[in-house]
Amino acid sequence: MTGRNRNTSSRRATLADVAQVANVSAITVSRVINHPDKVSGELRQRVQEAIDMLGYIPNQSASSLASARSRVIGVSIPSLSNIVFNDVLRGIYDVAGANGYKVLLVDTHYSPMEEEKMVRTLLSQSPEAMIITGGDQTRACERMLLKANIPVVQMMEILDSPLDMNVGFSHYRAGRDVALKLLETGCERLGFIGARMDTRVQQRLAGFTEALQSSGKFDPGCVITTPEPSSIALGGEMFRSLISTTGGALDAIFCCNDDLALGALFESQRMNIKIPSDLALCGFNDFETSAYVNPSLTSVHVPRYEMGVTAARMILDALDNKPALEKKVDIGYEVRMRQSTRTAQDPAK
Amino acid sequence: MTGRNRNTSSRRATLADVAQVANVSAITVSRVINHPDKVSGELRQRVQEAIDMLGYIPNQSASSLASARSRVIGVSIPSLSNIVFNDVLRGIYDVAGANGYKVLLVDTHYSPMEEEKMVRTLLSQSPEAMIITGGDQTRACERMLLKANIPVVQMMEILDSPLDMNVGFSHYRAGRDVALKLLETGCERLGFIGARMDTRVQQRLAGFTEALQSSGKFDPGCVITTPEPSSIALGGEMFRSLISTTGGALDAIFCCNDDLALGALFESQRMNIKIPSDLALCGFNDFETSAYVNPSLTSVHVPRYEMGVTAARMILDALDNKPALEKKVDIGYEVRMRQSTRTAQDPAK
DNA sequence: TTGTAGGCGTTATCAC
DNA sequence: GTGATAACGCCTACAA
């Protein structure tokens, strides 16, 4: 069962086998599969019967080799555990699959070196296009990508100078907007909890910091970060820690994503800290839980599925030689104010 | 940039190009890449320099074709959105990647027909092995898989007669155990909320039902299901609906997974129903949130990552012709009692 | 509409 | 240790 014998009797059927059974030439079988309209009805049926009878499945390696078309799109994401990428992948798979493309997916574990290795692996499969995450590639990785001479989309964030195409949003502006919104609700002392601290999280923090600095309200003592991956458990721990180091003097905390924010929210309940009256809480990414937890969690909503769809569409358009409407698409975001933050104060009051 | 011209100057470097630059034969270059120890140090270095200089990346299609080894493992899951599969995939990717295998992943959207199509797609890539979900394949799909003559692991559930290898656990017994545990805590009228209703959820319900029937406590009026995919929002709706149709007479509700259970929990808070005193709640799959929400959610924990790792290991062992210790592995599960259910009554009392 | 010839880039086999 | 030759299974180009 699990062996790999290649004796003549049980080897995989080939185009030639089908051709022989159907009493036609190999190329006719190929046509029945790839261009059925170019074969007469009678032959088509005879060939189809032979295909079914032999259980013939085309050998995609041979096809790729001969045609220089692999029908594969390479996709590289930094983490399989971060569910943020689920929605994006769904968008990519939906569009790619509907158009006859397979997706070869790799996980770089947030490491540019590993990404370089993975991209090399992907390229060895002769993908017709690549979708990769962010702009932190090694120089060697960039060179490979450029040399491959295929459409490339960098996704998740807006880049100053993308390799080719780009879809995402500005994490810097999102972080800044969160700070501004919190200030608008009357919060004065704002804290930040950040984990993993990849480029995008760093940008959120940079924007957040900038907004506070320009209103003279930034206090580095209210920021805690860790390179560890974020989780609900970690959010709880960091929340407790930040509350204790700041002596409970904070008005609001911005958590760099919803895992952390939910952890903080649950921990605050255990610590008997009232959200939002004692303390406001804001997350990032807008997980489904965030909208339904009590109190519901203010968060930054990102159209992730749409981002995946857009990335894939940009690829397909490029492969079809359609003129790309835009090489750079800002997919946007939206700060969704919910119960975990206070309502904006009436400026007229 | 996004074109696909194949003029001589910019085409991808081949083994022959490298060989020419290094002034050796093609096969020597191949050896440097695949069996470096079989090439003298001097040649190895010269070839390596040529490889770097040309940015040579091997063509895996050609390699697969010539060697009949693709280094690809095909993986088929029913849903990319169901985060249950994230952990499993992580396990598979970790093990496969560490052993030089690529993963080709497809999503069947819980449809056997689509699965058949996707499996065909996977097989056309000449995978060296396959990992698929559950045992609900079409006959045609089974035939293809058998005919491919490669190791196959069916995962997620224990099957009576697997195609080849199998790793999972009994959803029937898990559902039954939940009912028994709830009965032990003194609950008498048990409800069930189920969504998607795929085979595995049906088995959970069957086990749950059986346990209740054998103690004369089963009431079909306390069971509601829907074919819709589960979500937190849906959990809230179904909870509200079940409470209303049963007139609030339930002691406990078993939700077929944690999405639904969390939705129910959040909705109960809004409805001012006290968990667990008014009503006990139990989920399934033990998401991270479940352990940290207040009250924490009783759920059935499943070692998903380990299941993925095990599936991949079984595959690797089979590919190495190691005698499989077991063709069927029960990975188990554990009902984790938390605050959302009552504590077992002291039988001595 | 159908078929023939040749080659895609790599590796297995066998020779040196 | 190194190289020549012949597949691997399919598709493009051209011919009939």
Image: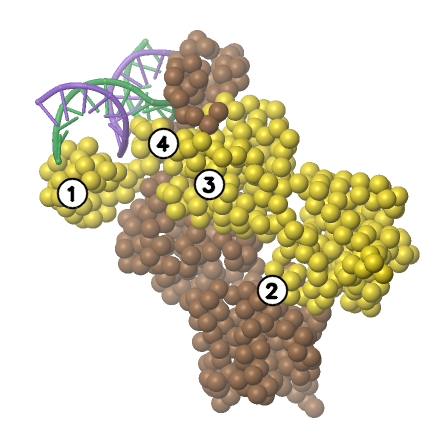
Chain colours: A yellow, B brown, C green, D purple
Side of A243 where B54 appears, left or right: left
Label 2 amino acid? Asp
Q: State the residue position of label 2.
A: B286
> What residue type is disc 4 on?
Arg
Circle 3 sits on which residue? Answer: A313
Q: Nearer the viewer, mark 3 or mark 4?
A: 3
Query: What residue would you read off at disc 1?
Result: A44
Q: Mark 3 touching mark 1, by CB under 8 A? A: no
The chain holding disc 4 is: A
Q: Kindly report the distance in space between the C-alpha atoms of the residues bearing marks 4 and 2.
A: 43 Å
Query: Which chain is mark 1 on?
Result: A
Q: Are marks 3 and 1 on the same chain?
A: yes
The crowding category of the residue bearing disc 3, from other C-alpha atoms within 10 Å (few below 14, some 14 to 19, many at least 20), is some
Q: Mark 4 sits on what residue?
A: A69
The Cα atoms of the two marked residues, 3 and 1, are separated by: 33 Å
Find residue A215 and report its horizontal and vertical position in percent. 86, 44
Q: Give the spatial CA distance, label 1 vs label 2.
A: 52 Å
Position of C12 with respect to A21 (left or right) is right
Residue at x-position 72% and y-position 49%: A256
Give the label, 4 or 2, closer to the camera: 4
Where disc 3 sits, the SS reads: helix
| SS label for mark 4 | loop
Q: Nearer the viewer, residue A333 or B177?
A: A333
Do labels 4 and 2 touch, CB within 8 Å?
no
Image quarter hosting the C terminus of chain A: bottom right
Considering the numbered disc 1 on the image, is that residue within a helix, a strand or a loop? helix
Disc nearer the start of the sequence (1/4): 1
